[in-house]
Amino acid sequence: MIVSILFATHRNITIKSIPEFTQEYLMILSEIYASTRMQELMQTGWTDEQKKLFTDHQFQAQHDYYQKVYPDASYNVIIQGDKVIGRLYVNLYHPSDIRIIDIALLPDYRNQSIGSSILKDLQQHCRSVGKVLSIHVEQFNPAKSLYERLGFIHAETYDQVYILMKWYPEN
């Protein structure tokens, strides 16, 4: 279970497993997802209602895909104090690597070293079990530079949009 791996407590951060995707969790997770798309959607000229309909639809499609492709993954929320501030989905069960399926924080909690603390905890776990840590990232995602600073390297490119980045425990 991912909760026992992570110790990002220096900022009062808790990683909590999602026991079941209740309507309450889905609403929070959809809000987190939508926050990752806001910069992009500002350029559309859409109304707030159109943006919400779009992100709700995209969230549901992504959620269904993750559930189908990663049925045994660890689905978690990131909590600071008593507020859900992000999500962390991780596939721990691949024989050669631990795959970060998704990590996202609400805008007010970005650029505060929360994400890097979580990633460093995952790296420490990977080092202890001798596994590679990997993540797919869009080429123009601002978080790509964070992954590079933490020692992730460009391993493969998919559809000229996504990069598979890997961190090796020997680093």
Image (cartoon, rainbow, N blue to C red):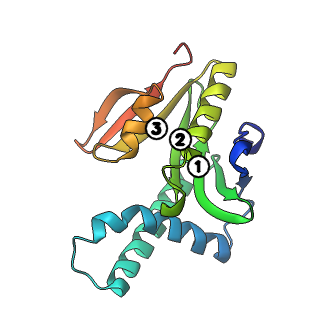
Disc 1 marks a residue whose amino acid type is Tyr
Give the mark, 3 or 1, whose residue is nearer the N terminus. Answer: 1
Q: Looking at the image, tell me whether mark 1 or mark 2 is earlier in sequence order.
A: 1
Q: At which x and y percent is residue 102?
A: 51, 49
Q: Mark 3 points at which residue?
A: 135
Looking at numbered disc 3 in the image, what kind of residue is underneath it?
Ile
- Nearest the viewer among 67 and 125 is 125
User: Residue 161, how many percent across, how many down?
Assistant: 26, 45
Tag 2 residue? 100
Local SS, label 1: strand
On the rendered structure, is 106 left or right of 2?
Answer: left
Residue 27 figure quarter: bottom right
Q: Number of labelled discs? A: 3
Real-space Cα separation, disc 1 to disc 2, in angstroms: 6 Å
Q: What element carries label 2?
A: strand
The amino acid marked with disc number 2 is: Ile
Q: Residue at 51% across / 54% down in the picture?
A: 104
- Residue 166 location in percent, x, y? 45, 27
In-image side of 96 versus 128 (left or right): left
Q: How far apart are marks 3 and 1 (CA)?
A: 11 Å
- Residue, disc 1: 89
**Residue at 67%, 28% in the rendered image:** 125
How packed is label 3: few (under 14 Cα within 10 Å), some, or many (20 or more)?
many
In the rendered structure, are the residues bearing label 1 and label 2 in contact, judged by CB atoms less than 8 Å apart? yes
The residue shown at (42%, 61%) is 36
**CA separation, marks 2 and 3?**
5 Å
